[in-house]
Amino acid sequence: MDRKRLEEIPNHPGVYLMRDSDGAILYVGKANSLRRRVRSYFDREHDSPRLRALVRKIRGVETILVGSEKEALLLENNLIKEHQPRYNVRLKDDKKYPFIKVTLDDLFPRVFATRLVENDGAAYFGPYTDVKGMRRVLKLIHRLFPVRTCTYRFPSKTKIRLCLDYQIGRCPGPCEEKIAPAEYRAMVDQILLFLKGRSRKLAADLRLEMHRASKERRYEAAALFRDRLTAVEKMVEGQRITTGERIDRDVIAIAGDGDDAVAVLLRIREGRMGGREVFPLATGAERDPAGALVKRLYGETLPPPREILCDREVEDREAIARWLSEKRGAAVTLAVPKRGAKKRLVDMARANAEHEKEALIIRKMARKDGTWEGVRLLGRILELPVLPRRIECFDIYNLGDRDLVGSSVCFLDGLPEKSRYRRYKVRSVGGVDDFASMREVVARRFRRLLREGDELPDLVVIDGGKGHLSAALAAFREANIVDVPVVSLAKRLEEVFRPGFSAPLRLPPGPALHLLQRVRDEAHRFAVGYQRKRRGVSTTRSALDAIPGVGPARKKALLAAFGSAAAVRRAPAADLAAVPGIGPALAEEIDRHFRSAERKERS
């Protein structure tokens, strides 16, 4: 870098962009004195290898002057988000993290998961790195608060009829004005308190509503408020008290550096632990990763709490705190505690971060074995846009026209992820129609993934040929799925069919083909197991439930004594009569029933 050009940089607040020989942006930073900050990169030898590598690649520095620290922070954040420079702190896969959205601008707001954050007047809560945890939160909200799940706009020009959700108590029926907007909004306000972690305020409001409804002799409403209050109080009891101060604070710690860095954020609300988020990081060449992370996390939708505790010093701490205070509308403190209860919280966050960093390294090492080689080769052979780390496979299985079932299995980095296995009883298909069955199962799976804000797979594999692939593509259109690659694998010649290609692809023997076969065979095994289970249940039901006098209790006693319906069928009447609750008369009736069934089968 030319020293004369460094002297030309103004001594003024602003943002600087460091570029390489091709003009690509390597790093974006902000400073109160641009000249001093930029010169500091070239005036000394740096301890960090990444920082030394950054300095070696810099061929030009562009500066943008601003009028205040706040403007510099905002501009820096926007430029990093737009350009994603290699040497800035980045949240890995941050676009995939889901949020819980509350559509406050609607007359009757909805609450659902989304990955798209917009400036649309809605309230967003997240990001949730633990998707399962987010689903549990959503499930609890919809169980306690019957907000609507439909996508209608209110007021509506067309007549909307009550749906099943209203009949089962999952929706208060705003479509036919069964609830006033003010009453519905009061319920939404309670949901907001719940999502913000204001458990005590929510409990007090629910207790007040319960007593009011009871005095007004609205006993069903009082019971509803009582159930919500019980659930909230139970949740509060399960949260561990961390400090005697009933304030909101976030605790942030970072472990590792480079591409192996992990940040952990502990959410503490009203003095109680409210949750934990884990963010895999790429720390780049940041001299201040903690400050960079704080700006990334709270620069978008994450609302800053009253206090943020970090495990390391933060440059421009006061400037960042002023910016966050303005964003929050109340004072925000950014601190690095050295002793006492707050220091213990930071130590707890750091221990969590160290654990997550070790787990990340172990996962990376696991990818180096044969399964990871199969993932890498498969992505290259199929020319996929991203590495197929997460693969889901679908299969349909039937026995005649009875017990038509489907399955989906999931592999992560070439290994089964059994918590994501799903099985399906085909509902909409009469008779044997594998294509229609495949379309139904795939559509159901992806509609649920979208509804719950869950991760989409990097590759979908269909057990079958061209027809099955076409059915899956139709299901994708039905569920509004785009940009998810899908192929089918036919058993007879192990041919791979791809959309847009008339001729099938024959994979050479090796890790890629073995991975596809393993995924396909696992989906088939899971479907066959489910079909056999259903057939066994059906056989037991037809064999014992049709006998007069044999109810659930006697059926259970017979199966406990003999082990299966087939063994009951073979047992003599004397042995049947010895089972508690059966007796000689009913034993004779059971024996006659089975003998009659045998005669019908022979004829």
Image (spheres, rainbow, N blue to C red):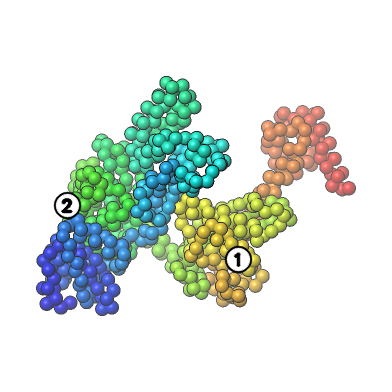
Between residue 36 and residue 173, name the one nearer to us: 173
The quadrant of the image that shows the N terminus is bottom left
Q: Earlier in the sequence, mark 2 or mark 1?
A: 2
Left or right: where 199 falls relative to 596: left
Residue 201 placement (x, y as % from top left): 33, 34
Number of numbered callouts drawn: 2
Kind of residue at badge 1: Leu
Q: Is residue 88 above or below residue 350?
A: below
Q: Residue at x 20, y 72 (%)?
A: 61
State the image quarter where residue 267 is shown.
top left
Residue 69 placement (x, y as % from top left): 17, 57
Q: Residue at x 29, y 57 (%)?
A: 296
Q: Residue at x 46, y 21 (%)?
A: 217
Between residue 322 and residue 528, name the one nearer to us: 322
- Callout 2 secondary element: helix
Between residue 215 and residue 312, name the one nearer to us: 215
Return the residue found at the far right. Answer: 603
Which residue carries the number 2 mark? 318
Between residue 456 and residue 243, name the one nearer to us: 456
Q: Is residue 171 above or below residue 362?
A: above
Residue 161: image tag = none
State the image quarter where residue 73 is shown.
bottom left
Kind of residue at badge 2: Glu
Residue 115 placement (x, y as % from top left): 41, 55
- Callout 1 secondary element: helix
Which residue carries the number 1 mark? 469
Is residue 571 visible in the rendered image? The answer is yes
Is residue 31 visible in the rendered image? The answer is no
Residue 101 placement (x, y as % from top left): 40, 48
Crowd band around label 1 with a 10 angstrom C-alpha radius: few (<14), some (14–19), many (20+): many
